[in-house]
Amino acid sequence: MRRLNPRQIEAFRAVVLTGSVGAAASLISVTQPAVSRLIRDLQQHLGLVLFERRGTGLVPTSEALSLYGEVERAFVGLDRIAEMATELRTRRAGFLRIAALPALANGFLPRFVGRFLADRPKLDIVLSGLVSHAVVTAVAHGQCDLGFAEASLEHAAVQKEDMPVAPMVAVLPQGHRLARKATLRPADFEGESFISLGHSTLSRFRIDRVFAEHGVTRIMRIETPLSEIACSLAGAGAGVSLCEPFTATEYATRGIVARPFEPRIDFEFAALTVTQRSMPPVARDFIDAFRQHVAEFVRREGWKRAPADRAGRAGSRSGRAAGSAA
């Protein structure tokens, strides 16, 4: 197969993004007949039907959507090259790309970014919310300057700095019978409909370990990879859950209540930077300031470290060991 024409790919991407030949033509500054010809030639070249006409618009086929994923990854790389050239040419005062796991990106971290920028009017920031594995990959591949992800994840090209730990909290629907208790323990969850975090997280391992060690049977009714979804489900009365306090605090006005949980299960995350190049000074400033911000939040919210029984401490230690080995 001969090489693809870059203009055909550009036209294809524009039509997927806009849904019409006319809008695509405006987006890439060519005529409508030129876009139609480029799309027709691309379909003939690939031997695929990429679009179906619906009324006055074009709808991408399943094959087109699969192809678009690869095209978009290529364009993101090209856009980043253009951005870097602009930064070098204009000597901007600062540019920081940050990726963070959803537990932080859903509100807690963006509010801190706003405070951080208030004293740095010439600093530009790109902030992305990604699952922890994707954060590690983005840092390793140089797609961001700084990341925040679960501390248990390792990558040869990434160095990490542990951030302050925060105890996981019980999340309950407002009005739930357990909300009357000041502190909740595993036995309180016996027979409760439980919203579990996804199997791929260290937090899920630690939670299940504690309940197993205390011989508590929960009704494992719902599973979700994101604590935001767990809190939303709890707020809708679908069950109870445990999650980190950042998300629980974020959802405190959305139909849930949070209570301390014993024995303590720590939520641990780390700041990630690439190993093979020096850290930008502004990234160093950001990590240090955010570390202090997290520590102040944990103290202010009062999620104190309660005396844990031996089984709880053993569960936490074994969870860390298992997470490090995973």
Image (cartoon, grey):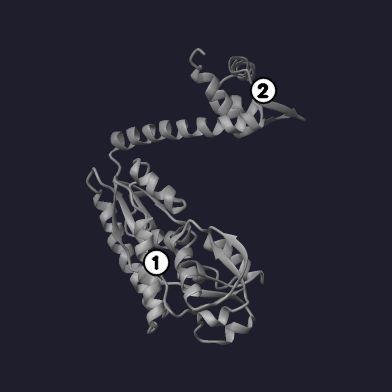
Q: Looking at the image, do the residues carrying marks 2 and 1 touch, with CB atoms under 8 Å apart?
A: no
Residue depicted at x 53% and y 24%: 10
Above or below for 313 versus 125 = below
Horizontal and vertical percent for residue 269? Answer: 37, 61
The Cα–Cα distance between marks 2 and 1, rounded to whole angstroms, is 50 Å
Q: Quadrant of residue 257?
A: bottom right
Horizontal and vertical percent for residue 306? Answer: 39, 83
In front: mark 2 or mark 1? 1
Kindly identify the amino acid type of the residue bearing the numbered disc 1.
Gly
Kindly identify the amino acid type of the residue bearing the numbered disc 2.
Val
Badge 2 density bin: few <14, some 14–19, many ≥20, Cα 10 Å: some
Above or below for 24 versus 131 = above
Above or below for 196 versus 34 = below
Horizontal and vertical percent for residue 179? Answer: 58, 83
Label disc, if present, on residue 49 of the rendered structure:
2
The answer to whether residue 151 is seen in the rendering is: no
Q: Which residue matches tag 1?
A: 319
Closer to the camera in the image, 40 or 312: 312
Q: Quadrant of residue 35?
A: top right
Looking at the rendered structure, the secondary structure element under dot 2 is loop
Horizontal and vertical percent for residue 229? Answer: 58, 61
Horizontally, residue 19 falls left or right of residue 325, namely right
Quadrant for the C terminus in the image: bottom left
Label disc, if present, on residue 38 of the rendered structure:
none
Badge 1 density bin: few <14, some 14–19, many ≥20, Cα 10 Å: many
Horizontally, residue 213 falls left or right of residue 88, namely right
